[in-house]
Amino acid sequence: MNEKLLGIFTSTLGIPASEMVDDLSTANTAAWDSVAHLNLVLSIEQEFGLQFSPEDFMRMQSLGAIRSLLAERGVA
Amino acid sequence: MIRVEVATPETFEEALPLFEAFRNPPIPAARWRRLFHYSWPSRERMRGFVLRDGPRVVGFFGTILYERLIDGRVEKFADLTSWVTLPEYRNHSLRLFEAVAGLHDRTLTCHTAIQSIHPLYRRFGFKELESKWIVILPKLNPLRPDGWFRGRIITAPGQILKKLDDREGACVRELASDICHPMLVTHRGRKCLMLFTRAKGRRFHFARIHHVSNREVFLACLDHIRWRMAIVGRALLLAIDARLLDGHIPPGGRETPLALVALYRSKTLRPGQIDNLYSELTLLGL
């Protein structure tokens, strides 16, 4: 899961994998705007075959939160 | 500390520099003011949400709040307008959307969302309100419509109000302005009130009709309406959202895709029950 997820982050936000920590979030990442967030969530849904609710969509505003959510959905 | 707050009429002066930074060509401050100081009575103070960094307003998402009587029920609306955030705060702009999407007690409309952001709206329950309009072309002889007209067309707001009761005339009193114009057709004892804005198309000026109170009268008198629009409204073409004509394409009309698909979210209303009257289209003249 981790490698695929970091690949999505790199291609969507342009952030190298080496700089990605769980604290990475919309609040501290200038490139993570609303359009980037939409693309990020759509890419994650496509990659992992999932569909997120509006509540999940809003919750996914940090790398840590996304990892937790994917774990909850059984993505290993 | 960056936070989201409810915008009120008093927020206007603080938010104005944001608008001036974004709109090209610029919209005069007096028009932006209409989003904050309504020309209709309203008990509600909310005008949308602002994003603040300390005392400074760095983002805004407007809501034009109004009520309409539809099928005997009072329906509450919010027309969404002007989602703007300074570039260095764009990573916080989603918080404004979250606040707006949380308005579940009313019908939401959005006429100017760009296509790339539609999946975001749709994820939060928005559907297509309108994707087409009917453009009604000028007649070959624009000087005089065919046939004797057994009706009357009035465009002066004061005269129109004399012909309407309080309820019928409310939208004229509340919305007629330098950019939103009323027209009343009386024909065989029936009335049709229209409100329209004028805009410059690629080649011609056109009148965009936002409200038609009586579709049958409108269609029956269309030749005379477009002649009058050309003379008084200085608009060669008429454009009207397809849903306002219930899919009917009148002679001389052509269905054309809207540049921006309009969206809505409602628990109670269908697209055909929603017009564009109290919206950013008539307040800002978009």
Image (cartoon, rainbow, N blue to C red):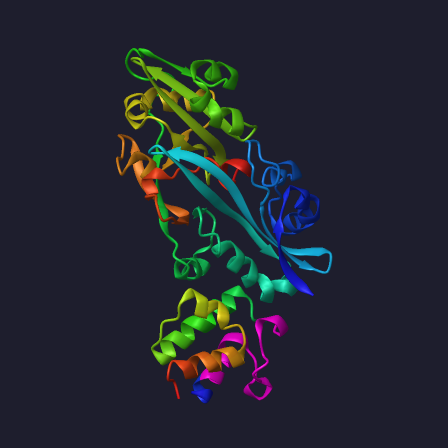
For residue B222, side relative to residue B79 (left or right): left
Give the vertical position of B48 relative to A22 (above or below). Answer: above
Asked if residue A15 lies in the magenta stretch, the reply is yes
Q: Nearer the viewer, residue B223 or B190?
A: B190
Q: Position of residue B244 (x, y in %)?
A: 34, 36
Residue at the farthest right position: B55
Q: Residue at x 47, y 52 (%)?
A: B113
Give the vertical position of B204 relative to B130 (above or below). Answer: above
For residue B238, side relative to residue B10 (left or right): left
Residue A47 is drawn in which quadrant? bottom left
In this view of the protein, can residue A8 be seen by the observer? no
Q: Position of residue A60 (x, y in %)?
A: 49, 73
Q: Residue at x 66, y 47 (%)?
A: B20
Q: Position of residue B146 (x, y in %)?
A: 29, 16
Give the residues drawn in magenta, as a range: A5-30
Asked if residue B228 lies in the magenta stretch, the reply is no
In this view of the protein, can residue B199 be seen by the observer? yes
Q: Residue at x 44, y 41 (%)?
A: B76
Q: Nearer the viewer, residue A30 or B240?
A: A30
Give the vertical position of B218 relative to B200 (above or below). Answer: above
For residue B272, side relative to residue B28 (left or right): left
Q: Nearer the viewer, residue B120 or B220?
A: B120
Q: Position of residue B230 (x, y in %)?
A: 43, 24
Give the vertical position of A54 relative to B80 (above or below). Answer: below
